[in-house]
Amino acid sequence: MSQTPTPAPPPPSPPPARNGCLTALMIGAGILMLLPGVCAALIIGFDPRSLNNWNTLSACLSFFAISAGGIALIWVAVRRGRA
C-alpha cells in the first residue's frame, strides 16, 4: 500500500491592517470612561463616611466598574495595535 503525501500547510496570513481611526476612537472612549472613576475617587476622598450610605456606595462601585471597562478598552486598543 502506498501513502499519498500530505500537502504542506498554507503559510500564515499576515495580520490585518491596523485602522488608526478606530484605535484613536477606542482610546478616546476609554479616556472618557475613566472620568466616572475619578469622580468616585473624589467622592470617597473628600468624605469617606459617605460610603455608609448604600446609594453612594453602589454609585461609586458602578463608577469604578465603568472605569475598569475604560481601562480594558484602552488596553485592547493598544494591544491590538502591537499584534
Image (cartoon, rainbow, N blue to C red):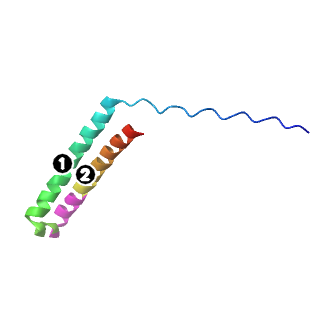
User: Residue 53 colored magenta?
Assistant: yes
Asked whether disc 2 touches disc 1, contact meaning CB atoms under 8 Å apart, the reply is yes
Provide residue 81's location: percent of width, then percent of height.
37, 37
Residue type at mark 1: give it.
Leu
The quadrant of the image that shows the N terminus is top right
Range covered by the magenta-colored residues: 52-61
Left or right: 9, with 61 as reference point: right
Which residue has dot 2 on it?
A: 67
Residue furthest right as drawn = 1
Q: Residue at x 22, y 43 (%)?
A: 31
Which residue has dot 1 on it?
A: 35
- Work out whether mark 2 precedes mark 1 in sequence or the reverse, and give the earlier one: 1
Left or right: 9, with 35 as reference point: right
**Residue 20 occupies quadrant:** top left
Q: Residue at x 14, y 53 (%)?
A: 39
Say if 77 sits above or below 68 in the image.
above
